[in-house]
Amino acid sequence: MASLKTQHAALANRLPPQAPSFEGGALNNTLRIHPPQKSERQQEQDNNPMSIDVQHISKTFGSFRALNDVSLKINDGELVALLGPSGSGKTTLLRIIAGLEAPDPNPGASIRFYDEDVSRRTVGERQVGFVFQHYALFRHMTVFENVAFGLRVRHKSTRPSKEEIRDRVEKLLSLVQLAQFSKRYPSQLSGGQRQRVALARALAVEPKVLLLDEPFGALDAQVRKGLRAWLRRLHEEIHITSVLVTHDQEEALEVADRVVVMNNSKIEQEGTPDEVFHNAKTQFVMEFLGQVNVFHGRVQKGKATLGDLTVDYPNYSDDHERPATVYMRPHEFEIRRQSNGKPSFPARITRTHSAGAVARVFLETEDAASVLVELPLDEFSNLALQEGETVHLYPKNARVFIPSESK
Amino acid sequence: MSKNFAKRQVLPGFGITMGYTVTYLSLIVLVPLAALFLKSAGLGVADFWKAVSSPRVVASYKLTFGASLVAATINAIFGFVVAWTLVRYKFPGKRIIDAMIDLPFALPTAVSGIALTAVYSSHGWFGQYLEPLGIKVAYTPIGITLALVFIGLPFVVRTLQPALADLERESEEAAASLGANRFQTFTRVILPTILPALLTGFALSLARAIGEYGSVVFISGNMPMRTEITSLLIISKLEQYDTAGAAAISVVMLIASFGLLLSINLLQHLAGRRYQGAL
């Protein structure tokens, strides 16, 4: 825990006194990344919306099917998160967009950056900025050399002069707040600093799109939170079309404009963070995003029943009764000592803890199903709940899914 | 070493182990080498200089160091290719090829010398086709170099393998995504990373080649001034009971080899210092 704290403090103290703050100055910096004489080209780029459109992409590794006919559109300037458990195909999709992996040959498959078909281009030709989970910094180069790499390897005809390279690298380094570390080697930096170097290196080549493969996956929780908030602000300033791969739902919901939930080599659902969180279309999305209480009920004639409770479920109007799964989020409950006549179910409190932003109450129903309820702290203290007592649970909201026949 | 802050070692006894190391090194390495110097010192300056600078001896130095440097360079290049193949690819028979790399270590050097001579002499498998083309291998410096390449290969391959296995594929992908072509990725990313290991392999291969005797004497033909290596010269001096002369030449070899290895070590230090020494 001590090291965590120091890391966090270090992150905060890293700002040199004259460096722009996260909030204010970075905008100016970004604009200054581009040398003035390039402004025409820059304008051209601004007028050229950089959307990404992948259609009917499949990918198999040996006998393993990593992607199964996936299509996805990403709008210009959008920050999209590909979210899913490991093995869901999200990283493969990102690598295919980047050109680090080739999709299975399939007549319908295409990868387009705005109006250009880039399927046959190599990763270098696609002009993408790629940020790797384990940074992939060149360890024999200083921070400065790392960031300058993409400019130095350019062909003579397009390579900026030494002074321009130096200016641009320095501006990028102050954008990621590492200006004073330019002479260090990657081994002398912390994980969070390394990842910011990797980001500066990817941005140095003025990529058309920015692709991030679990960029914060190798960092500890505290640094991760700081960095993702910072990434979001950076994106708001430079508006580069970005795709972020993550298995951390909190990260995806917090950072992204749009979340694409993937599972089993397919896209389960895509939408704004609000949409996917509050209107999960599939059982998988419901369970993957946020915490849920799961109950097993029955569904018949447009109604799902769970003990005394009934929930409208117009999607199933058949007379034939079928098992259904009912989900309730921990914060969508009311707890009362006395029944008020409305449908509820009794449960016994097994444990409570209130060390946090909300109080968590762990309960057990009569059929020994465990339930987690989250209450605002003041409500929790008003109720003065005791462990061991039996209370009535009033669900405010419930979502019903009929498990597919195959499962 | 401050006693107050001495760290507890996993294995005890710095005193004992250090004492052992010094004694052991003295007995095995320093004492024989000192004897060598003493023996050659018996000659006196003028005779020493005459013994180590006669044209025949100088010719042998040139041949030994020249052929060794060429062989070590060839090994560095092709050993890299072999190590790369073994690390990066999966193919049937990989295990067998991997095991074969060590054969030059294990084979008595005389056996490899005889085998190479048999293959490359004017009636051998390869020799009979090469000779009409005007390429003579056996009994020429080419043959000597070939033998030295043979015995030095494992050093380069074995030192490079772990370094190559440690290379992050991602840094190659990163280089490609930043617009570097394959040549740039190789020269700017891969090569600098493995350079220390490559230099170690080169140095080991070179050291082995300079001291090599067994595999060379058969294929070289041992013609004075042309294909006579220094080790052989030393042996022939000994056979003529000229121990002081032999010792004198040995001393020159010793100093030259030491200087060479030291400078390679220095180079390696410079190459590795930047990112390994830090922190």
Image (cartoon, coloured by chain):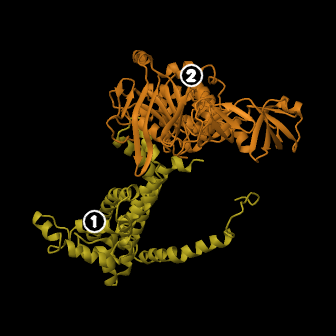
| Residue found at x 75% / y 36% | A308
Which color has been applied to chain B in this rendered view? Answer: yellow
| Position of residue B98 measured from the top left corner of the image (x, y, whole percent) | 38, 66
The chain carrying label 1 is: B
- Residue at mark 2: A236
| Residue found at x 41% / y 57% | B87
Q: Secondary structure at mark 1?
A: helix
- Residue at mark 1: B145
The answer to whether one can see residue B209 in this image is no
| Residue found at x 78% / y 32% | A343
Name the quadrant containing residue A374.
top right
| Position of residue A83 measured from the top left corner of the image (x, y, whole percent) | 55, 36
| Position of residue A63 measured from the top left corner of the image (x, y, whole percent) | 41, 52
Position of residue A398 relative to residue A115, above or below, is below
Position of residue B250 relative to residue A96, above or below, is below
Mark 2 belongs to which amino acid? Glu
Q: Secondary structure at mark 2?
A: helix
Are circles 2 and 1 on residues that touch, CB within 8 Å?
no
Crowd band around label 2 with a 10 angstrom C-alpha radius: few (<14), some (14–19), many (20+)? some
In the rendered image, the quadrant that contains the N terminus of chain A is top right
